[in-house]
Image (cartoon, grey):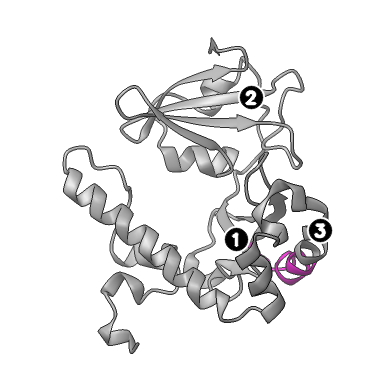
Amino acid sequence: MLDFLKPRHLRYRSVEEWRERENITTFQHPENPKLEVRLNRHLRQLRNHLWKKHLHQLTREERYQLKTGNHPSQSHRGFESAAPTFEEFRSRVAALPYVDEVAMVTRHLQPIVFRVKLAQSANWRVWQEHIPPYYRGFEVVVNRSQNRKPALTHESAARLIPDGMSENDVYAILGTNARVAIVNGGQKHLSYLFQFPPLPPKVDPKIGALTVIVSKGVVTGRKFEGNHPV
C-alpha cells in the first residue's frame, strides 16, 4: 500500500518518531477515555505494522521458527540459543557513540528482547537509522541510561522510584521487562524479579523482587518481596 493511503500513524518508521511528531507524551488519559483507547489502539497497530515489515526481511527458516513457536526469542528457555544472534546484534550497535549498554533480557516464560540503553542526549533521529525496532525475530527495546547506576536497596527505593514519578521514567531506570498486572480498579503493578542477568541498577542481593505501584500514570508506592511496603 502506498504511504499516502495508509492511516497516518502507520506511516512512521518507529514508535518514537510517531510519538514525537504527534506530540504524544503519555498513553494515560483518565480524563478522556476515548483518547486513551485510541492512542493505545494506534500503538498496537503501529507495532504490529512494524513487525509485519520485519517478517518480510527474515529468512524462511526464521519465519518458520516463529510460526511454529520454536524461535529463540519466544521464551526464556531460548536464552542460550539466542546468544549468537545477540552477539551479532551487539557487535553492530555497541560501538555507536551514543550507546551506553546493550543487553539481552527476559523473564520466566516470557519472550527474550534486546535492550539498548542510550545516552540521555541521543534523539530518535540519530539512532533510528542504526538501531531497528526488531532484529532477526527479536524485539529491540530502546531507553535512556541514567547518568549513574544508583544502588537499589530498601532504604534507597523511595528515592530512586519516588511517588509521583511517571511510568515511563520507571521503565527508563528499571527496564521494561516487568510483569504488569492491573488491580484495584485500574491500579497497575509493575513487578520486577531480579533473577536473570543483567541486573538493573546495582541491586541489593537480598532483594528478590520489587513491585512498583502505578496509578493514573504515576508511582504511588513500592513493595518488596514478602509484600512489605517501602
- List the single residue furthest toward the bottom: 2
Q: Residue 209 got which mark?
A: 2
Q: Residues within 10 Å of mark 3 (few under 14, many from 20)?
A: few
Vertical side of 67 occupied by 55: above or below: below
Task: Report whether residue 24 is seen.
Answer: no
Vertical side of 95 occupied by 27: above or below: above
- List the single residue furthest toward the front: 68
Residue type highlighted by circle 1: Val
Q: Position of residue 110 (x, y in %)?
A: 62, 45
Instruction: Tell me whether the residue at label 3 lies in contact with that at label 2, contact meaning CB atoms closer than 8 angstroms.
Output: no
Task: Report whether residue 194 is seen.
Answer: yes
Marks 1 and 3 sit apart, C-alpha to C-alpha, by: 17 Å
Pointer 1 residue = 140
- Observer-nearest of 149 and 206: 206
The quarter of the rendered structure image containing the N terminus is bottom left
- Observer-nearest of 198 and 80: 80
Magenta stretch?
88-98
Q: Residue 41 got which mark?
A: none
Residue 229 drawn in magenta: no
Whichever of labels 1 and 2 marks the residue nearer the N terminus, that label is 1
Whichever of labels 1 and 3 marks the residue nearer the N terminus, that label is 3
Which quarter of the figure has residue 132? bottom right
Pointer 3 residue = 81
Whichever of labels 3 and 2 marks the residue nearer the N terminus, that label is 3
Which quarter of the figure has residue 134? bottom right
**Horizontal arrangement in the rendering, residue 25 relative to residue 81 (left or right):** left
Which quarter of the figure has residue 176? top right
Q: Residues within 10 Å of mark 2 (few under 14, many from 20)?
A: some
**Horizontal arrangement in the rendering, residue 73 relative to residue 52 (left or right):** right
- Identify the secondary structure beneath mark 3: helix
Vertical side of 12 occupied by 119: above or below: above
